[in-house]
Image: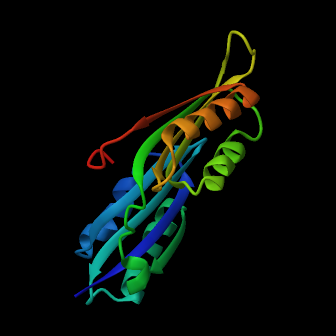
Amino acid sequence: MTHRWIVTVLGKDRPGIVAGATKVLYALGANLEDSAMTRLAGEFAILLIFSAPASVTDQRLRQAFDRLKRQQQLSLNLKPLTKLESRAPKARGIPYLISVYGADRPGIVYRVSQALAHSRINITDVQTHRSDLKGKRSGSAFYLMLLEVELPPGVKVTSLERTLGQLGRQLGVEVSMRGVESHVL
């Protein structure tokens, strides 16, 4: 029998953070099931979901991660997942990728995510990146947002493309969508 956990790790970006966190799991016989890891500005953030043998106690996990936390000066949070939380979410629709790019300005993420929520579209992943390189026309920094979403039954792709296109024009950004085979995600 195994138990599932989620751990979040945050610290100054430097080599060895991923190796340190995954070494803890490997040493305890845990299996890394799902992850998101990224550098944001000068910080590195990790989200890991893993399963560990029932013999790996809460105290043993916390001790192993506390050692890593102290050695690498990290912020760390460990949470056991209940049986209900451990269930993999069922896909609730057709997977699509949406890209948004153009001059940086406040409200891009909010306005796009609000439009998607209004249409009952679930966002499964978001990545954003701001470049200090200035756009030729705008003179502003360049902004890129990539979203993975699930379109529920009844949402018409053409209608959503039209809505996002109008929003893109209001925000001064380009918005595009494309379908994705589910095995790609």
Answer with left or right where residue 64 lies relative to residue 31.
Answer: right
Answer with left or right where residue 168 lies relative to residue 49.
Answer: right
Q: Which of 140 and 48 is in front in this view?
A: 140
Task: Identify the residue at image location x=46%, y=61%.
Answer: 47
Q: Where 131 sits versus 6, above or below?
A: above
* The quadrant where residue 112 appears: top right
Residue 64 appears in the figure: no
Q: Which of 74 and 79 is in front in this view?
A: 79
Residue 134 appears in the figure: yes
Q: Which of 71 and 22 is in front in this view?
A: 22
Task: Identify the residue at image location x=68%, y=50%.
Answer: 114
Task: Identify the residue at image location x=42%, y=83%.
Answer: 84
Q: Where 183 sits versus 8, above or below?
A: above
Q: Where is residue 120 in the image (x, y as percent from the top left)?
A: 58, 57
Answer with left or right where residue 160 lies relative to residue 172.
Answer: left
Q: Where 94 sits versus 166, above or below?
A: below
* The quadrant where residue 52 appears: bottom left
Q: Where is residue 46 in the image (x, y as percent from the top left)?
A: 47, 57
Say how many tags the image has: 0
Q: In which quarter of the image is the N terminus?
A: bottom left
